[in-house]
Amino acid sequence: MDILNEQKFIDRYLEYTSDLLTNELVDSMKSYRHHREISTHFHSVYVSYNVLKACEKYNISSAREITRAALLHDFYLYEWYTEKHDENHIFYHPKESVKNIEKYIGKLSAMQKNMILSHMFPTSRVMPKYHGSWLLTYIDKRCATADYLKLSKNFIPVYEEINRRSKNA
């Protein structure tokens, strides 16, 4: 990814998410592994940044609301490789993310809640109901695949720029 060509998107992304990126608990997502060596924070920024770009491409008016939910879609705050629950991580983590968001960040809209609860569709038990839900579901799968194939490394310069600028906000 050419960082110079991404400046417009980085600016918009930070406009929508800088308050979340500077949140201590959101920042703590850097310490949780998500896909192999990829942190939950990196994956969530990668997904939400691509969600924003899709919203811009398709002129979706609720881009801010969708981007913010996408950033928090994996806000489950535990090491899923080692910490087990009564329910499989695939089913458990979306509910835990919603619970954590509403406890530590604030109330979610109906669309944001559905986005997070359904982002594992079709393996989840919740069906996507909104355009933002379908967009997150698709882009999350695409980015997770890139994570496992080590293709998301191309996003590192953008990720580093977002982190650098969010700390200076």
Image (spheres, rainbow, N blue to C red):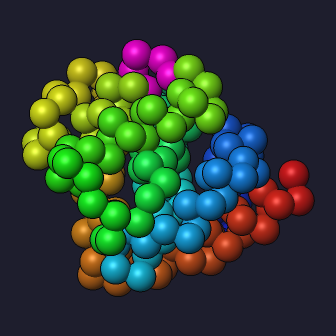
Question: Quick check: is 121 in the magenta stretch?
Answer: no
Q: Residue at x 44, y 59 (%)?
A: 78
Query: Picture quarter containing residue 127?
Result: top left
- Say which of 133 and 107 sits in front: 107
What is the x, y in percent for residue 95? 33, 36
Is residue 2 in sight in this rendering?
Answer: no
- Say which of 34 and 111 sits in front: 34
Left or right, 8 with respect to 109, comes to right
Residue 90 drawn above or below residue 65: below
Q: Residue at x 41, y 66 (%)?
A: 79
What is the x, y in percent for residue 56? 51, 39
Residue 90 drawn above or below residue 161: above
Q: Residue at x 17, y 52 (%)?
A: 88
What is the x, y in percent for residue 136? 34, 42
| Residue found farthest to the top | 110
The residues colored magenta run: 108-112
Residue 130 drawn above or below residue 121: above
Left or right, 93 with respect to 8, comes to left
